[in-house]
Image (spheres, rainbow, N blue to C red):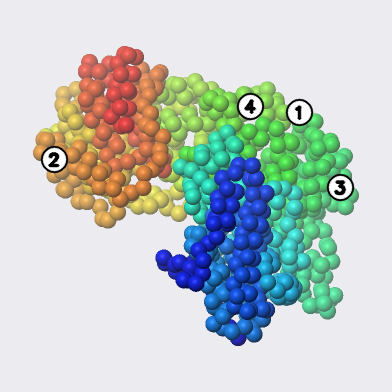
Amino acid sequence: MTESVEETAGPAGARSPANTPAPEGGYPAARLRLLQDEAPAGPDRRAALARLTDDWLAGLLARHGAAAGLSGTALVAVGGYGRGELSPRSDLDLLLLHDGRADAGALATLADHLWYPVWDLGLALDHSVRTPAEARKAAREDLKVQLGLLDARHLAGDPDLTAALRTTAYADWRESAPKRLPELHDLCQERAERQGELQYLLEPDLKEARGGLRDATALRAVAASWLADAPRGGLEAARTRLLDARDALHLTTGRATDRLSLQEQDQVATALGMLDADALLRQTYESARTISYAADVTWREVGRVLRARSLKPMLRGLLHGRTAGKGERSPLAEGVVELDGEAVLARTARPERDPVLVLRAAAAAAQAGLPLATHAIRRCATATATKPLPVPWPAEAREQLVTLLGAGTHTVPVWEALEAEGIITRLLPDWERVRCRPQRNPVHTWTVDRHLVETAVRASALTRRVHRPDLLLVAALLHDIGKGWPGDHSVAGETIARDVAVRLGFDARDTTVIATLVRHHLLLIETATRRDLDDPATVGAVAEAVGSTRTLELLHALTEADALATGPAAWSAWRGGLVADLVKRVAARLAGEPDTEVRGAGEPTAEQERLAIEARRTGGPVLALHTRAEAPTDADTGPETPAPAQEPVGVELLIAVPDQPGVLPAAAGVLALHRLTVRAADLLLLDPIDEGPVLVLSWRVAAEYGSLPQADRLRADLLRALDGSLDIPARLAERERAYARRSRVVLAPPPRVTVAGGSSDTATVIEVRAQDAHGLLHRIGRALESAGVAVRSAHISTLGANAVDAFYVTGEDGAPLTDATAHEVAAAVERALQ
């Protein structure tokens, strides 16, 4: 009996054996024509490519098998090729099956005549040579082999061998399914943890990520076990769209890749006839969401079936309750009960007569931490299509929506189930614009729609801090609803939020509050991190926009929820402190208290004053380093939200130096040379009447790698930078060239420098948005120095790979710049960064 032989690729530099002709010109030419022909795209082209390859391989087996006098062999396609789906650069998964009577040498020669022509064409090959018994043994030992055999398809040779193998493969799978399905589920979960969720990734792996082609194949295997089946609605269409995208990706790149990289998305979109890369990602996300939802439902059903099977028949007859399969129902809400770990409709429920039932069931399921049964959702979906909620909604419907949003983390799976069946867009038509919409800012973890739900989840932990939790939760759900429309999403969102609030049945006053929250949901974080809080115009502008202390209270909670739901780079205790300080100042202004009663972050601390005095005395820079870890703020945790870990240890660096030209670029350049990443920074000019002005720079930095530098080394380099003996631009340029030689080019939007008009009465605010990079702040500082302006204060923040900096500058006379000069300065800084 010939031993099994299995490989995944040909030997390096492999060529066909000398007595084997090179691959026939007919197949390569026909394959090339087929792939270049735009007419048979999609499933038709994949099937045509499979048929073409079938005929070619069948010819090879017939010719060389007959020449060797071999019988009792069959060539079998398995895996994706077995399903008759060949993408342009797909592997060929082949099994040479034999009855065990052939001569081992002749069989090995025949295998060479089959495998080498495939390698000669540059195609990847996954192959094996086995008897049916060996194939069954390999399947018992390797789950992936067993899954591949479920798609076995006869190509050539003895069809009885293939038919017998398929029969035994399915019988073995169904017999071993109770043991192997949990193993398959574990593989799917491990892959999801490693690859992430396809529906939220900017560069998704179409095959391996959760919701990708691997999961679709796993669902086919579950169905073949006869233990459970996936919801079929839209599943095959979703799988087909992912396969079409992979085809286009293969043709665009010329490589066997499944990762949809950013630089290839526009080309793939064009190849598929789509408008742009965003349209491609949105369709990809929708497909992945369909597959993920089907997988969730299917694996839940598998678990239920396996639990029921694990009970012995006699024991099942003796036990009572849900676990005994008696179908005991526990009431959750009117028309909603718990049955076997799911929220289902009561026997007496009539969704066609009760349009609020769908929201009541969803709220009850989320509050109980249960999944909402698929059949219950579909009954409600059918009912809402024929008898929708009246507009405006009745009070109960609005209350049930708020209850659903306030359920914390349990809201997400219930909401996704409703969305998968089309109920959300039926209840809230404006949701369609944001559904599966990608966000290309790397700070964002989620698509727009999932981010909105996540914000509501975060807001649910903050409801005890506000007087109107319902307004907070609804505003959280709607705050980015304008991202589906052109222009400023906050402005567009205000109009949409007003319409939705009216639809939900809120009165005019509450509608105005929700619209205000949506319009200004970025106001606090942007002002706190990019504006001078000591400038009276700053606090006044926020107070005027917010209008009341109660709206301010809601906006504060919404700001935290939004940032926490965005991603780890968007919120920290430091940012929370800045926002809290701004809120105190605005609250004091709205209450009519004097501004001076609120201590500002811009006022010098005792240590800053001490360093400034020392800098005046010595006439040189004075530094202080403080290593610390930030604990999470109170708002970071809640009853439904896991407490986050402390932020990584960072360093607070204080520098005080007598004011002189070039301090900011020199200090920033020294930090860059010492590989210190600037997370945030503030610049404060202390200018007593009787003493010389001193610049105090407060930095939050972290070592890029290695240990932190000593303060005396930083001070020595800063002195050299200020006196001109340390050429920082040359040193940074040298490092950039070395970095560029060993790094991939990162595609990033160009920097943008603007003038923030009306932000201050005493200075001109220059805003810089750019890709964070070594020496960025140094280049900005040099550009501002060259423009002849004085930096009165600066507010630097980094969000992921993006730097968002604001500089308060004045002319030599200490007054704000004219509009023309301000725009010239902004243009000069932008040129310096390009």
Give left or right: position of 586 versus 771.
Answer: right
Measured as percent of width and height from the top left, residue 92 is found at 57, 62
Mark 4, Cα crowd under 10 Å, few <14 / some 14-19 / many 20+, is many
| Residue to which mark 1 is pinned | 392
Q: Earlier in the sequence, mark 3 or mark 2?
A: 3
| Residue to which mark 4 is pinned | 496
Q: Earlier in the sequence, mark 3 or mark 4?
A: 3
Q: CA distance from mark 1 to mark 3?
A: 23 Å
Measured as percent of width and height from the top left, residue 816 is found at 30, 17
Q: CA distance from mark 2 to mark 4?
A: 56 Å
Report helix, strand or loop for mark 1: loop
Report helix, strand or loop for mark 3: loop
Which label sits on residue 349?
Answer: 3
Report helix, strand or loop for mark 4: helix
Give left or right: position of 161 versus 702.
Answer: right
- Return the residue nearer the eye: 470 or 224: 224
Closer mark to the observer between disc 3 and disc 4? 4
Give left or right: position of 665 versus 310.
Answer: left
Report helix, strand or loop for mark 2: loop
